[in-house]
Image (tube, rainbow, N blue to C red):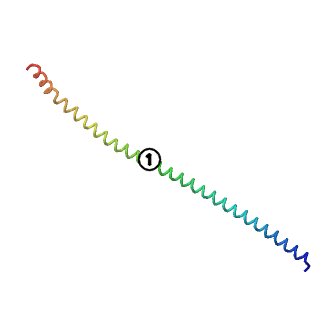
Amino acid sequence: MSRADVLRTIKDAEADASATLTKAESKASNIVTKARVAASETVAEGRNQAQADSQQMIEDARAAAQKEAGKVSKSGDKDIDSIHSGGESNRSTAVDVVLDAFRA
């Protein structure tokens, strides 16, 4: 093999190596890009799931609070009715006490 052939073979090998390196860098770049996209999608899905979970927790808490408020309201209504009933039965006695106080 002549010197020109050896140099040509070396140049061809260098060109092939350069092309292989360029191709490998391109593949690496694509892999990194795909990984970033996948990571972004994972983060977005996690964020959406967290928002859905927190919304469900808020709705559950609201339902529990409304249920408890209903119980308290019923209890308060019963107390009000009891006070009102007791007041009606004691009204004539109270009127008599007040009138006796003014007469004395």
Q: Is residue 80 left or right of residue 14?
A: left
Residue closest to the far top: 103
The structure residue drawn at horizontal position 88% and vertical position 76%, both measured from the top left corner, is: 6
Image position of 53 with respect to 98: above or below: below
Q: Is residue 55 left or right of residue 30?
A: left
Q: Which residue is mark 1?
A: 58
The structure residue drawn at horizontal position 48% and vertical position 52%, both measured from the top left corner, is: 53
Quadrant in the picture for the C terminus: top left
The structure residue drawn at horizontal position 13% and vertical position 27%, both measured from the top left corner, is: 93
Give the image location of residue 58, x and y in percent: 44, 47
Q: Is residue 33 left or right of residue 94?
A: right
Q: Give residue 85's quadrant in the image.
A: top left
Residue closest to the far bottom: 1
Give the image location of residue 59, x and y in percent: 44, 46
Image position of 10 with respect to 57: above or below: below
Give the image location of residue 96, x and y in percent: 12, 24
The structure residue drawn at horizontal position 19% and vertical position 30%, both measured from the top left corner, is: 87
Q: Give residue 4's quadrant in the image.
A: bottom right
Q: Give residue 81's quadrant in the image.
A: top left
In the rendered structure, which amino acid carries the disc numbered 1? Ile
Q: Within 10 angstroms of label 1, few (less than 14), some, or many (20 or more) residues?
A: few
Q: Nearer the viewer, residue 24 or 98?
A: 24
Element at label 1: helix
Q: Nearer the viewer, residue 46 or 6?
A: 6
Image position of 28 with respect to 76: above or below: below
Quadrant in the picture for the N terminus: bottom right
